[in-house]
């Protein structure tokens, strides 16, 4: 029974995320209410609040996965692993994790990316969350890759990678696979950054 209950919760959560992002795309973030999101997902507003504290939280529904994926990648990394291998592998794991609400190439991923860039309240939350993930990633990178990188270099590299990723995700890919584009951009950033 527990498995069925968990699957039902997963489906309800996914339905709420899809409904919210679709409505945000159709009528704007500020123009969308929790009641409308719940109605689109065919649940009650009370059910919405069982999953999310506010409509802003839906946009950040996958945030916990960053820590989960980082933990998995760095637990498997060998001490002294080359930075030029570890950073692209980390981004590859993030880009292809099965647990995301949608893959990188999904239209609602594009909606989410646009919202994070254009809605001031979401942008502020995104920058704060990104800073926390970046700080944690930089520390893990330093711990695993020293002396290839010192702490400042590890922080600068993760900042450069995050900046490149954000810029790449906001661009049209011209029909190319988004994951491949992202990994290519990261590879070029890392190889341009890694100290001699």
Image (spheres, grey):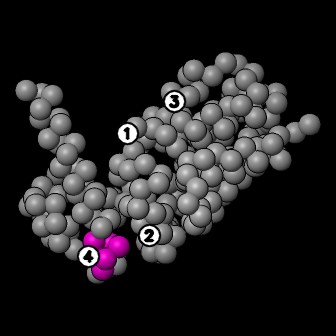
User: Residue 161: x percent and y percent?
Assistant: 68, 50
- Distance between the alpha carbons at the discs numbered 4 and 1: 26 Å
- Mark nearer the viewer, 3 or 4: 4
**Is residue 69 shown in magenta?**
no
Q: Say which residue appears at 73% left-offset and 23% top-offset.
A: 81
Please identify the quarter of the rendering in which residue 1 is found: top left
Counting residues from the start of the chain, the first of labels 2 and 3 encountered is 3
User: Residue 146: x percent and y percent?
Assistant: 77, 27
Image mark for residue 99: 1
For mark 1, give the secondary structure: loop
Q: Answer yes or no: do the residues labelled 3 and 4 have beta carbons within 8 Å? A: no
Query: Which residues lie in the magenta part?
Result: 23-27
User: Residue 192: x percent and y percent?
Assistant: 83, 47
Q: Would residue 108 be found to the left or right of residue 36 on screen?
A: right
Counting residues from the start of the chain, the first of labels 3 and 1 encountered is 3
For mark 2, give the secondary structure: helix
- Distance between the alpha carbons at the discs numbered 4 and 2: 13 Å
> Relative to residue 45, is residue 65 depicted above or below?
above
User: Residue 7: x percent and y percent?
Assistant: 18, 37
- Distance between the alpha carbons at the discs numbered 3 and 4: 35 Å
Q: Which residue is tagged 4?
A: 32
For mark 3, give the secondary structure: helix
Q: Which residue is tagged 2?
A: 115
Q: Nearer the viewer, residue 112 or 195?
A: 112
Q: Answer yes or no: do the residues labelled 1 and 2 have beta carbons within 8 Å? A: no
């Amino acid at each position: 029974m527990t498995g069925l209950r968990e699957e039902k919760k997963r489906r309800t959560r996914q339905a709420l995320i899809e409904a919210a992002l679709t409505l945000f795309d159709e009528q704007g973030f500020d123009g969308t209410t929790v009641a409308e999101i719940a109605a689109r997902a065919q649940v009650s507003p009370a059910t919405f609040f069982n999953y999310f504290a506010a409509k802003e939280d839906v946009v950040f529904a996958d945030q916990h996965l960053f820590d989960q994926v980082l933990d998995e990648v760095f637990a498997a990394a060998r001490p002294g692993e080359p930075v030029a291998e570890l950073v692209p592998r980390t981004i590859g794991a993030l880009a292809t994790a099965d647990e995301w609400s949608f893959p990188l190439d999904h239209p609602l991923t594009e909606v989410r990316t646009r919202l994070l860039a254009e809605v001031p309240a979401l942008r502020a939350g995104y920058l704060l969350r990104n800073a926390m993930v970046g700080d944690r990633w930089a520390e893990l990178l330093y711990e695993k890759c020293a002396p290839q990188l010192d702490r400042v270099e590890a922080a600068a590299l993760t900042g450069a990678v995050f900046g490149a990723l954000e810029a790449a995700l906001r661009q049209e890919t011209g029909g190319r696979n988004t994951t491949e584009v992202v990994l290519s951009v990261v590879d070029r950033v890392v190889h341009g950054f890694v100290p001699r």
